Image: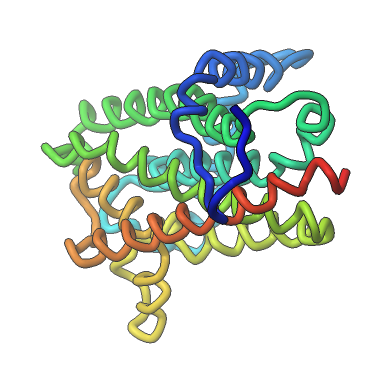
């Protein structure tokens, strides 16, 4: 039975669950087509973060000589790169939901939210490969006596993944909803994400942020994620319970806002194609 929506936010959780097989198909499609017709295939999941880490090590470690709180430069930068790539991958690919799937949306009905959900799930494959790379490097440095001390906080890592997925999904849905009407915003997003990365303690520890810029640390939901991850796996990190609560609250607000906007836009998007 088809009825008109009764509210501006008509999130059909039961409908998404009924289409879980479609989500699985989208995940498979994303995994198969990501590196189709490439020479190295999934090895790019290792090469890309490793090359970025080496560049950060050379530029910010050797030339700029930024502090890493006593952690080996390669481990410090790799830890930030792995986390940032997962969140930004979820954000970037979700932000193009309407543009990349306009033809599909115009031909058949299914819950549109299944597409961005599939993106978040399929990106976990990349995260798993890159985490394996990070843990391998961590084991090598630990065996060589480097001052890294993983602790029981590593058990919180699944919760950090959930927060990053929610943050990337919420921002991606918001951007996708906006760019469905204002296409020129797509040119601003890559620059904004790049600036956000440098406002996040990826290439420097949060403990070195000057006092006058501490407000950026508070309003940036990725800061407690990165710092808690480093504290858990490397034994070094500057994070407080209040910072974690604020980060979770901002992430929840962004996710809800993204879902509301996405729910509104999807109703008129097909008619505007």
Q: Can you see residue 192?
A: yes
At a point 27% along the width and 26% down the height, the residue shown is 139
Task: Say left or right for 134 vs 237.
Answer: right
Give the percent coordinates (x, y) of residue 22: 59, 17
Task: Say left or right for 2 vs 233.
Answer: right
Quadrant including the N terminus: top right
Name of the residue lying farthest toward the left? 152
Quadrant including the C terminus: top right
Task: Say left or right for 11 vs 238.
Answer: right
Please count the marks in the image: 0
Name of the residue lying farthest toward the bottom? 212
Give the percent coordinates (x, y) of residue 21: 53, 13
At a point 54% along the width and 16% down the height, the residue shown is 24
Q: Nearer the viewer, residue 140 or 223?
A: 223
Task: Say left or right for 37 vs 13.
Answer: right
Q: Can you see residue 259?
A: no
Query: Please, which colouring scheme is shown?
Result: rainbow
Residue 246 placement: quadrant: bottom left
155 in relation to 122, above or below: below
Give the percent coordinates (x, y) of residue 211: 33, 83
Residue 114 placement: quadrant: top right
Q: Nearer the viewer, residue 144 or 82?
A: 82
Q: Nearer the viewer, residue 197 or 205?
A: 197
Give the percent coordinates (x, y) of residue 57: 49, 48
At a point 49% along the width and 22% down the height, the residue shown is 125
């Amino acid at each position: 039975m088809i009825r008109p929506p009764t509210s501006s936010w008509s999130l059909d959780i039961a409908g998404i669950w009924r289409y879980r097989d479609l989500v699985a198909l989208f995940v498979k499609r994303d995994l198969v087509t990501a590196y189709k017709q490439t020479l190295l295939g999934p090895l790019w999941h290792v090469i890309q973060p490793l090359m970025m880490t080496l560049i950060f090590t050379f530029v910010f470690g050797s030339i700029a000589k930024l502090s890493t709180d006593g952690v080996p430069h390669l481990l410090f930068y790799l830890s930030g790169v792995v986390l940032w790539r997962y969140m930004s991958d979820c954000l970037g690919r979700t932000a193009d939901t309407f543009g990349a799937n306009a033809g599909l949306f115009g031909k058949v009905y299914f819950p549109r939210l299944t597409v961005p959900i599939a993106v978040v799930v399929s990106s976990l494959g990349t995260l798993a490969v890159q985490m394996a790379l990070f843990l391998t490097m961590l084991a090598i440095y630990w065996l060589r006596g480097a001052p890294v001390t993983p602790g029981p906080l590593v058990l919180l890592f699944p919760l950090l993944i959930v927060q990053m997925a929610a943050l990337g999904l919420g921002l991606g849905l918001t951007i996708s909803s906006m760019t469905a009407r204002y296409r020129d915003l797509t040119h601003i997003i890559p620059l904004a994400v790049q600036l956000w990365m440098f406002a996040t303690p990826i290439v420097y520890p949060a403990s070195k942020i000057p006092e006058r810029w501490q407000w950026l640390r508070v309003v940036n939901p990725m800061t407690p994620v990165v710092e808690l991850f480093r504290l858990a796996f490397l034994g070094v990190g500057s994070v407080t319970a209040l910072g974690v609560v604020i980060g979770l609250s901002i992430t929840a607000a962004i996710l809800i806002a993204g879902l509301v906007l996405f729910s509104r836009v999807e109703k008129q998007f097909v008619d505007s194609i």
